[in-house]
């Protein structure tokens, strides 16, 4: 039952991830952390970090969540469920690209979803910040990471590794 | 040309692309183009650009979706499956290994401190993503209103983000959907 629920939720969430992998986060946090208690806010943060460190898209973090929920089978099924909607939707769109691109329905609904997602992500950032930023040092690491990623071309993976080393030495 | 490409070729090529895909979207797309358009000549520059556009306007990770689109062009559904499997193989295996390690060393003092630093960096990363998205997306008061409403609906009223995304799509349709 748990596996079925995991797969179903990931299929729904990935079908609605419009505008980049980070769009998953508000939905993942609500369903997996708050509603089903399959992982804690800290574990959710760690899953994001692993998804960011490994090559490929952030979606890989769903393998970590799947593993946490029900081991190796959970991890594999989580990845299959995450990519299934992509394969179905992309192949359909590839066939009808010109109709799709010009579609008023697609364009105008995306125009509403994209800014809304920014609001949702901001709420998630506050909730994760409450968990992760507990003292001046963690605050400092967050501010430096923000500045480095937002204003330089540094790969976020380096920033995460650097912060891990800083954590080992200082925290 | 396209007849000679096998599903196996596609899988190996995307395994290579997926294994070295650190870094941002733009460096990734440049890598795609070099491997697929310039080296292998599997598709033309125009086809590539179109695949990137499709990858960006479909749900899911844009890079994987671009790959799916290219695979589908080359070998239909088998090609699409080969690109997805190839592109995600290395990342998924590494993530599972890290997850095993992470679960096994739960409570380890050193790992706890490392993850405290990492968690703080993830919050910074998330803020920078929000900042970059806001710069390109929030260009008028309507967009700002969408963002603010969604923020309060989740942060204060704890509404479900799945419903909120669906609702903002429907409201977007009502607000922007009229033909002009």
Image (spheres, rainbow, N blue to C red):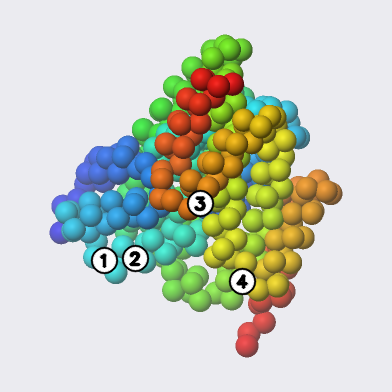
| Dots 1, 2 in contact, CB < 8 A | yes
Residue assigned mark 1: B45
Question: Is the residue marked by circle 1 packed among few (<14), some (14-19), or many (20+) residues within 10 Å?
Answer: some
Residue assigned mark 3: A150
Q: Which of marks 2 and 3 is in front?
A: 3
Dot 4 falls on which chain? B
Q: Which of A25 and A49 is in front in this view?
A: A49
Tags 2 and 3 both on a single chain: no
Q: How far apart are marks 4 and 2 (CA)?
A: 25 Å
Q: Nearer the viewer, residue A63 or B109?
A: B109
Q: Which mark is residue B56?
A: none
Q: Which of marks 3 and 1 is in front?
A: 3
Dot 2 falls on which chain? B
Residue assigned mark 4: B139
Question: Is the residue marked by circle 3 packed among few (<14), some (14-19), or many (20+) residues within 10 Å?
Answer: many
**In the image, residue B171 above or below residue A148:** below
Q: Which of marks 4 and 1 is in front?
A: 4
Q: How far apart are marks 3 and 1 (CA)?
A: 30 Å
Counting residues from the N terminus, which is met first, the one under dot 4 or under dot 2?
A: 2
Tags 1 and 2 both on a single chain: yes
| Dots 4, 2 in contact, CB < 8 A | no
Q: How far apart are marks 4 and 3 (CA)?
A: 19 Å
Residue A73 spot, x, y in % from top left: 52, 24
Q: Distance between the residues labelled 1 and 2?
A: 6 Å
Residue at x 66%, y 77% (from the top left corner): B177
Question: Is the residue marked by circle 2 packed among few (<14), some (14-19), or many (20+) residues within 10 Å?
Answer: some
**In the image, residue A89 above or below residue A51:** below
Dot 3 falls on which chain? A
Looking at the image, the residue that sits furthest to the right is B157
Q: Can residue A28 be seen in this view?
A: yes
Residue at x 60%, y 61% (from the top left corner): B134
Residue assigned mark 2: B49
């Amino acid at each position: 039952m748990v596996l079925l629920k995991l797969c179903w939720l990931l299929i729904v969430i990935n079908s609605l991830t419009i505008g980049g992998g980070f769009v998953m986060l508000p939905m993942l946090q609500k369903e997996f952390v708050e509603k089903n208690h399959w992982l804690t806010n800290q574990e959710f943060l760690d899953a994001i970090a692993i998804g960011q460190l490994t090559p490929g898209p952030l979606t890989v973090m769903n393998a970590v969540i799947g593993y946490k929920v029900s081991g190796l089978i959970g991890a594999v099924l989580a990845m299959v469920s995450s990519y299934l909607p992509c394969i179905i939707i992309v192949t359909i769109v590839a066939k009808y690209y010109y109709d799709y691109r010009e579609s008023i329905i697609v364009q105008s609904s995306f125009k509403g979803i994209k800014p809304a997602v920014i609001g949702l992500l901001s709420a998630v950032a506050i909730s994760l910040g409450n968990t992760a930023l507990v003292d001046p040092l963690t605050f400092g690491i967050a501010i430096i990471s923000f500045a480095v990623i937002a204003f330089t071309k540094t790969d976020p993976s380096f920033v995460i590794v650097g912060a891990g080393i800083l954590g080992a030495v200082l925290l | 040309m396209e007849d000679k490409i096998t599903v196996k070729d596609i899988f190996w090529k995307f395994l290579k692309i997926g294994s070295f895909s650190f870094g941002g979207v733009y460096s990734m797309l440049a890598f795609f183009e070099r491997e697929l358009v310039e080296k292998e000549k599997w598709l033309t520059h125009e086809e590539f650009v179109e695949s990137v556009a499709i990858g960006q306007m479909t749900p899911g990770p844009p890079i994987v979706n671009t790959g799916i689109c290219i695979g589908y062009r080359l070998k239909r559904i088998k090609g699409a499956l080969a690109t997805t499997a190839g592109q995600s193989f290395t990342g998924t295996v590494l993530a599972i290994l890290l997850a095993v390690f992470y679960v096994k060393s739960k409570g380890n003092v050193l790992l706890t401190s490392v993850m405290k630093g990492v968690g703080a960096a993830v919050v910074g990363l998330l803020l920078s993503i929000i900042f970059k998205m806001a710069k390109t997306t929030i260009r008028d008061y309507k967009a700002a209103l969408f963002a603010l409403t969604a923020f309060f609906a989740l942060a204060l009223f704890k509404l479900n983000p799945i419903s909120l995304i669906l609702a903002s799509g429907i409201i977007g349709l009502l607000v922007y959907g009229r033909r002009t």
